[in-house]
Amino acid sequence: MCGRFNLRLKPSELEEFFRVLNAPDMGFRYNIAPTQPILAIIVRDGQPTWQVAPWGLHPSWSKTLLINARSETVFEKRAFSKSIRERRCIVPASGFYEWQTI
């Protein structure tokens, strides 16, 4: 589970890799934190398209934004079960990391 990630690709590189045109230019981003705007690929009207959205999932019953799910339990947890079945997306990332305390 990551707490931060980065995206260091130009729009043209994203378009070539994912084969989805018109990628927004958000510049190189080295420290993307939860709730910040991110790029995602969603399917709209049967076609993949770019979407700028906040990083996180906001279940209707929750007051907080959730950012991580465990793959082992994602289909059983109430917070993620409907989204994992019906509302998937691709979030491009060049790298990810977690802060450590020493």
Image (tube, rainbow, N blue to C red):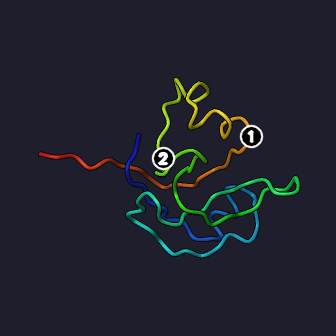
Disc 1 marks which amino acid?
Glu
| Quadrant hosting residue 49 | bottom right
The answer to whether 42 is drawn above or below residue 79 in the figure is below
Q: Who's the residue at 55% across and 29% down the image?
A: 77
Q: Quadrant of the N terminus?
A: top left
Of pointers 2 and 1, the one earlier in the residue sequence: 2
Picture mark count: 2
Kind of element beneath mark 1: helix
The x and y percentages for residue 63 are 48, 51
Judge the density around disc 1: few (<14), some (14-19), many (≥20) Cα neighbours within 10 Å: few
| Towards the viewer: 62 or 58 | 62
What residue is rendered at 48% in x and 47% in y?
A: 66
Disc 2 residue type (three-letter) = Leu
**Residue 20 shown left or right of residue 28 in the figure:** right
Determine whether the residue tagged by mark 2 lies in a helix, strand or loop: loop
**Mark seen at residue 86:** 1
Asked if residue 43 is positioned above or below residue 38 in the image, the reply reads: above
Name the residue carrying label 2.
66
Determine the residue located farthest toward the left in the rendered image.
102
